[in-house]
Image (tube, rainbow, N blue to C red):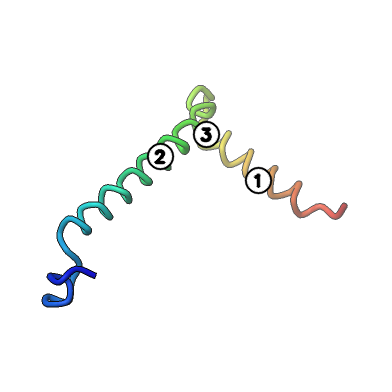
Amino acid sequence: MRLIEKITGSPHRHDIADSVHTAAAGVSRSVDRLSDALKQYSKADEPLVALMTDVFNKLQMKSKPK
């Protein structure tokens, strides 16, 4: 722990900046993965209906007894 952290009781601003940078990079990667996953639906006539149909079908497959 740095002296400034002990004195102020809060993290050093560089540590906060590093945390924000790491979080922003994680969000960016998540958005990229989501965009890639949804790309197939953007070409459908009814993108939301196609997505919800796939979600429904996957849920139905998971709930069926084996």
**Residue shown at 74%/51% (left/top)?**
62
Query: Circle 2 sits on which residue?
Result: 29
Report the amino acid beneath label 2: Arg
Secondary structure under tag 2 reads helix
Q: Find numbered disc 3 in the image and state the secondary structure of the residue it sits on.
A: helix
**Callout 1 environment at 10 Å: few (<14), some (14 to 19), or many (20+)?**
few
Which badge, 2 or 1, comes first in the chain's sequence? Answer: 2
Q: Residue 12: image x %, image y %?
A: 16, 63
Residues under numbered marks 3 and 2 in contact, where contact means CB atoms less than 8 Å apart: no
Could you say where residue 6 lies in the image, as x and y percent from the top left?
A: 17, 76
**C-alpha distance separating marks 2 and 1:** 26 Å
In the image, 7 versus 51, the foreground residue is 7
> Can you tell which of label 2 and label 1 is closer to the viewer?
2
- The image quadrant where one finds the N terminus is bottom left
* Position of residue 29 in the picture relative to residue 40 (left or right): left
Estimate the x, y position of residue 14 in percent, counting from the top left: 17, 55
Counting from the top left corner in percent of width and height, residue 65 is at 85, 55
Vertical placement of residue 13 versus 1, above or below: above
Compare marks 1 and 3 and give the one earlier in the sequence. Answer: 3
Q: In the displayed structure, does residue 14 sit left or right of residue 44? A: left
Q: Is residue 12 left or right of residue 21?
A: left
Out of 24 and 64, give the one closest to the viewer. Answer: 24
Residue marked by disc 3: 37
Q: CA distance from mark 1 to mark 3?
A: 16 Å
> Could you tell which of marks 3 and 2 lies nearer the N-terminus?
2
- The residue tagged 1 is 56
Q: What residue type is disc 3 on?
A: Ala
